[in-house]
Amino acid sequence: MNMNPSDKIKNLPPYLFKAIDVLKKRAFEKKLDVIDLGMGNPDLPTPEHIVGRLCDTVLHHPRTHRYPQAKGMPKFRKAVANWYKKRFDVPLDPESEVMALIGSKEGIAHMYMAWLNPEDVALIPSPCYPVHYNGVILAGAQVHTMPLLRENNFLPDLGAIPDKVLKRAKLLVLNYPNNPTTAVVEDFSFYKDVIAFAKKHGLIVVHDAAYSEITFDGYRAPSFLQFPGAGEVGVEFHSFSKTYNMAGWRVGWACGNSEYLGALEKFKSYLDYGVPTFLQLAGTVALESPQECIAEAVKEYARRRDYFTKGLQKLGWDFVMPKATMYVWAKIPEQFASLGSLPFAELLIDKTGIACAPGIGFGNYGEGYVRFALVTHYNRFHDALLRLKKFHQEGKRS
């Protein structure tokens, strides 16, 4: 009997955050004081009014413990539609153009499985959030990589995609504000070009907008769906994880083209029972309540960003100042550049206890970079910079 795992599993690259966990475990075993800037796992608490609604619902409304609706309860979907109208001036039909997800990561992977066949190609940026790439492999389809380069503001060059690839391409994936590069779209003609490109080549646009509310310096991220024609070609995925510090709650949503969501709903109905009702009701409160809690979180991330990036600049690190997300995407310093991003990340945590994410874990075009997540107490960044300064000094002597 063949007891090997499926080819889909064997073809997957090592999972980035598992590799980071191994490095952290080794550091803990060495009794190092670990400063974990690796995974984008928000350290700020979920706002009290959201937690309060969850607790009250679980305690006093036992009917919410039963199986939920696969696509989400009407109240939740209506709250999403109302939030979208208020935030982006995008009208959505909550019945057919919104569905609840067990987090946007799950939703994107399931979208691939619902729509991709083995002969299909998905156009995936590199670097990217790992599920953008890995989900295609799990769906049994093929990946064509679109490089995100600094000289191109980390935007894909759609004109560089070969015609023979476009003949088999079915999905185009975008993610702005971008993880890991922190890039944002400032010239909105980019989205208009994407829509025209998708219509010309018969592509489904999958836009991951998980960081739309974590923006700085006056920048306000748009929705892909706010541009004319977007609803004809695409769907957008959102998450409560970053916006409301609800990463462990696993709640998100997809919205947009009803045909594309219909296939996703059908797939999910065979695979899971949807988001627990008590979590959907807590998410509804998050969307319908005053949004000051988001501004407070963004203010804290900005404070950390400003302090940490100022210190990195003094040490000679090269990066683009992030206008969004909770990350700093930085080139590996010249004195360590020959190592590669994974060996550098290993060396950094071994010598300093600082965990970062190696760029190669986000795809081949992430090589030469590391990502620092701004997800620890403000005072810890002072410690991190002191350790980095010593690390640089010792590196120059070796």
Image: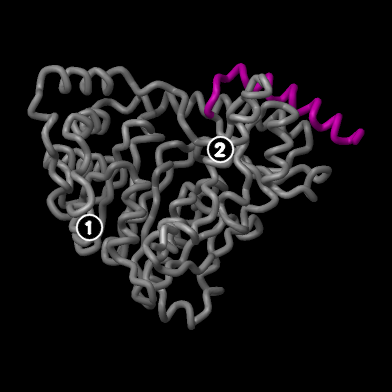
Q: Main secondary structure of the magenta part?
A: helix
Label disc, if present, on residue 258 of the rendered structure: none
- Of the numbered discs in the image, which one, if any, rests on residue 327? 2
Between 359 and 19, the residue placed more toward the observer is: 19
Name the residue furthest front. 1
Name the residue nearer the viewer: 173 or 34. Answer: 34
In percent of the image, x 14 and y 39: which residue is there? 68
Which residue does the numbered mark 1 point to in the structure image? 267
Q: Is residue 381 magenta?
A: yes
Q: Are marks 1 and 2 in contact (CB under 8 Å)?
A: no
Is residue 123 found left or right of 80 in the rendered image?
right
* Residue depth check, mark 1 versus mark 2: number of the one nearer the observer: 1
Task: Choose top left, top right, bottom left or bottom right for residue 111.
Answer: bottom left
Task: Tell me the magenta residue range.
Answer: 375-398
Q: Which kind of residue does numbered mark 2 sit on?
A: Tyr
Q: Nearer the viewer, residue 150 or 137?
A: 137
State which quarter of the image contains the C terminus.
top right
Q: Alpha-carbon neighbours of circle 1 within 10 Å: few (<14), some, or many (≥20)?
A: some
